[in-house]
Image (cartoon, helix red, strand yellow):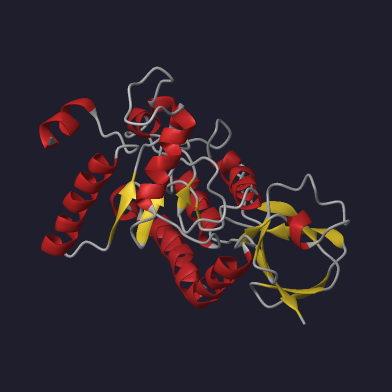
Amino acid sequence: ASDVYKRQGLDLTNPDAERWFQERLRELMREYGVDGFKFDGGDPSFYRAEDRAYRPALPQEHARQYALFAGKFHFNELRAGWNLGGRALVMRLNDKCHSWDQDGLNMLIPNSLAQGLLGYAYHCPDMIGGGEFQSFLDQSDALDRNLIVRYAQASALCPMMQFSAAPWRVLDTARMEMVRQAAELHRQMGARILALAEHAAKTGEPIMRHMAYEFPNEGYERVSDQFMLGRDILAAPVLKRDAESREVCLPPGRWKSADGQILDGGRTVLVNAPLDKLPYFERMG
């Protein structure tokens, strides 16, 4: 039976195929101490409506079965799902390009916010620098090192962050330190993010939140280049090439910037943001 599964692909509508696959993965966990798996693939586009299956299913349902299978493991990561909002599944954004404005960094926050609003709270942005493999390879001799820094900063206050190419292999010392600082900020926020994840498990509320979700009726529906981590941290990463400042919509109230400055909200402010700075603010009171 295992030879058939390997040759034709796994049909997870078949209980025997699911059982076989789970046994193989559990063996890896026992033998090598693996905690969990990144279940890459599973996209509906990988299936066809005419595919023969144990239980007839459309491509979307095959993708759903793949994700439900991943949910049997405490540590999981997926990049595709259908009708699975509220499940204990880590959903990574689909691959982004190594680009500022061509389905790259420019789409990281809008797609992330949409994912949270759709009920996928345990969100992981795409890999830092871009996870679209061919895009990364095509530019391997001329990677934009500033883009990698800004990718890391944009991910630092998301629920998770992960790297593609090891940053120490592609960055100079100065930029490597900027990326290290972004990773350190994420580590420092770990307890807060974990508490938000536990809250999401009980309520379904997103961890990474749209401005209009947290501040309704304030006109933030079209703000898609900044976000809230929970209700108290506002992140406003720099997403444009060569930019060293950006406008930030500060909601009503008082806000403390990363450098300790206290600002009154209810307005748009211009903040300095050289390459080594990620603008973010904490709500006071």
Q: Quadrant of the C terminus?
A: bottom right
Residue drawn 48% across and 67% down? 186
Locate residue 251, reporting x and y percent. Answer: 82, 64
With 119 as the anchor, is 188 left or right in this view? Answer: left
Residue drawn 45% across and 55% down? 89
Residue drawn 53% across and 47% down? 84
Q: Is residue 130 visible?
A: no
Locate residue 85, reporting x and y percent. Answer: 57, 50
Displayed quadrant of residue 129:
top left
Q: Nearer the viewer, residue 32 or 212?
A: 32
Task: Answer above or below: position of 169 versus 178.
Answer: above
Locate residue 218, reporting x and y percent. Answer: 87, 57
Locate residue 266, reporting x and y percent. Answer: 88, 64
Q: Quadrant of the N terminus?
A: top left
Task: Answer above or below: position of 215 versus 145.
Answer: below
Residue lying farthest to the bottom in this orientation: 285
